[in-house]
Image (spheres, coloured by chain):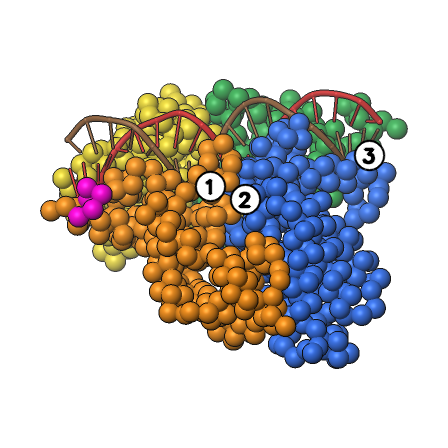
Chain colours: A orange, B blue, C yellow, D green, E brown, F red
Amino acid sequence: MRSNDGRTFTETARRTQITQAAIDVIAEIGYAKASIRKIAERVGVAMSVVLYHFASKDELVQAIINHAYREAIDAIVPELELERTAAGKLRTYILANAFFLRTHRTQYAAVMDIGMSYRTADGDLVNSLSIDPELMAGFTKLDVATILRQGQESGEFCDFDVERTATAIRGAVINGPIMEVMLNPEFDLDGYAEELVALFDRATRRG
Amino acid sequence: MRSNDGRTFTETARRTQITQAAIDVIAEIGYAKASIRKIAERVGVAMSVVLYHFASKDELVQAIINHAYREAIDAIVPELELERTAAGKLRTYILANAFFLRTHRTQYAAVMDIGMSYRTADGDLVNSLSIDPELMAGFTKLDVATILRQGQESGEFCDFDVERTATAIRGAVINGPIMEVMLNPEFDLDGYAEELVALFDRATRRG
Amino acid sequence: MRSNDGRTFTETARRTQITQAAIDVIAEIGYAKASIRKIAERVGVAMSVVLYHFASKDELVQAIINHAYREAIDAIVPELELERTAAGKLRTYILANAFFLRTHRTQYAAVMDIGMSYRTADGDLVNSLSIDPELMAGFTKLDVATILRQGQESGEFCDFDVERTATAIRGAVINGPIMEVMLNPEFDLDGYAEELVALFDRATRRG
Amino acid sequence: MRSNDGRTFTETARRTQITQAAIDVIAEIGYAKASIRKIAERVGVAMSVVLYHFASKDELVQAIINHAYREAIDAIVPELELERTAAGKLRTYILANAFFLRTHRTQYAAVMDIGMSYRTADGDLVNSLSIDPELMAGFTKLDVATILRQGQESGEFCDFDVERTATAIRGAVINGPIMEVMLNPEFDLDGYAEELVALFDRATRRG
DNA sequence: AATGAATGAGTGTTCATTCAT
DNA sequence: AATGAATGAACACTCATTCAT
């Protein structure tokens, strides 16, 4: 029986199982120490089983990234689409990201760790970790710059540079709290998100 | 001939040289792949020379962290102390950090990478990478929360939660752009900093 | 295909082969210089193969100790059990040990060397090299103190301190000749054993 | 100012100091882990000072052996010479050795450890650790075989093979208890020695 | 007489990957 | 579909020794 990508159901199930285990292990002990053997042990299979399902560690890492992005897109994009106004979308973007971070801490941690640690054989940082084409559409919708542009066109937002402000928002919504959370797991993400909503409202609204 | 810390002049020079080389190598190929051997090669000495000057890799990592913080403190704190008003300090905080990041890209990258990747033998993230006590005073002065608190007390700033807003500012000023810069070295940090100054002015000023 | 301990047949074979090679190498060049690399060379495999079958050098050392004790027990205990009288057992204890030492010189040498050289990470001498529980029963039967006690109870032996005399016998039967043999491989163990039989007969018999 | 061997007094003092420190370190952490650096640290000098006074580690080991033998000879031989009868000498041999072992545990342990662990570069056991010629005379007097031979000639002792019995006595008096003491520092050496005196009296006396 | 600096050879250990079954 | 076995390259770290000062 075949599902997609020419993969059987059990094949797909195993891949998902291994991907999830890899995420947990990376979140727990860090990407640097997360060897294939340890990931296999977590699943309860032999190390070579992992390499049977993923041609190389690189391919497993790719799968992790895609898995994480897919879940983020599935969780956040529908929320954004419930909103009509740019201000509402921005508010939702902040709150949904915080909620997702809170409920998917290990994924976030793993992806961030990979993002910093993963290099090609040449040592270059990873754009080589390209995103699955089928995810691109959803991925674009996750981009806060789109929201900001809509808000300026509609006149909801004041005048600012869209790209730069998007970078600032990502820094405050994603990069900042992920480090905070890694160092202090008690950090109150929901309270933080509400503060951010107010802060970026003051910073972006017209007049 | 002795200088400070019971260290020879040549000893101090070699330590600095190795520390700098380690920073460069980490920034270039990532902490995970930055082996002692590669660092030694960069300096042009045998690997054992590095371990002659630093008892272990951990000690070298500590030296890197302290070196980076010392330079950041020396570059930014005097600038902050030229300002009287909280608004002025916040503006300077943003601009000085951006300038420092632009001129010390490799240090920033190395420290961030270490911060994400470095774990104890147990796999725990590292607070064990503690800061040199003599740096603590300056380090505290680098904390943006102090500036925010002053601004609320003086009535310059509006009402917001100090700690949470500090996290947001750090995210936008430090964590966000460092990732941006790693992926896109052409990113215009000075332009970004000016945008941030305006953004956080709107977000913090009274009325 | 599984045999015992959840180990494959080939796994068991390899472990035995490596253990034997390790014994030979240690006997030849001493424990201190018997690196995993050299042991692997003796077997004719890559060094990592040894560490594939033994998680660490400590585990290999443990296997050596257990292997040696198992062989000694298998060789000596049945001989002892053929004897009824304490005097007969003592005589057999001496002769069987000498025979075993002559036919298993490298094992003896390796175990002695390990006993002197092996330390924990703290530098403490090793009790951590504990004996495989399944061997304990046989191991106890190897203890000459048991024989002495039986002889005193039966009235065969004269009055002496059992523990101290057992230490003396072990010194004369095991520790002494092993050093002698290491320095002079021509040493006539069988003649020595006969002399010991007479000596300890005079020293222990009643009246 | 010169003493002997063309060495100044301070030179001799330093050599003795280093030799003693080496003995302590070896007894404490074992020969295998007793590096020149650790020995130097114990003395409180730089590692290269040790190699200034001893051309190589081999030379230091030689010095340790000679030092230990010299002290054993100085302590035991005069005691033996107080005795006229072979039986008396044998008794004294046992007691004096036990006393010396009790008061010079670290030396004994170090010498035994070196004896098992030390090999030439070829891996051969060490006869290369030859004894200082000036010690040979005293060393010979330490040999229990001489005592046994005297006892048989005088008719004090019964008939036995001298060399083999000497090996047995050395095993019981030296090799056995040194292992016992290393594993159990509480072992009562004086009580053990008294038991040995009685045991070997029964085993050697005529009639 | 003493020492700081440097080094190459060696250690045990981890790891991603290959391959035959 | 799964796995046990094997391996070479890399890793951090230790050590005895050399040398200039």
Q: Position of residue C88 (x, y in %)?
A: 22, 43
Give the image quarter of residue C184.
top left
Q: How much space separates mark 3 and mark 2, taking CA atoms?
A: 65 Å
Please give the chain letter of the residue carrying mark 3. D
Question: What residue sits 61% from the left and 45% below the top?
Answer: B187
Q: Would you say residue A4 sits in the magenta stretch?
A: yes
Q: Is residue A171 visible?
A: no
Label 1 with label 2: CB-CB less than 8 Å: yes
Q: Which mark is residue A127?
A: 1
Q: Secondary structure at mark 3?
A: helix
Query: What residue lies at 69% left-to-right and 39% top-to-bottom?
Result: B20
Residue picked out by circle 2: B183
| Residue at the spot 34% in from the left edge and 41% down from the top edge | A59
Q: Secondary structure at mark 2?
A: helix
The quadrant of the image that shows the C terminus of chain D is top left
Q: Name which residue type carries label 1.
A: Asn
What residue type is disc 3 on? Thr
For numbered disc 1, what is the local secondary structure?
loop
Task: Specify the segment rendered in magenta.
Answer: A3-7
Residue corresponding to mark 3: D10
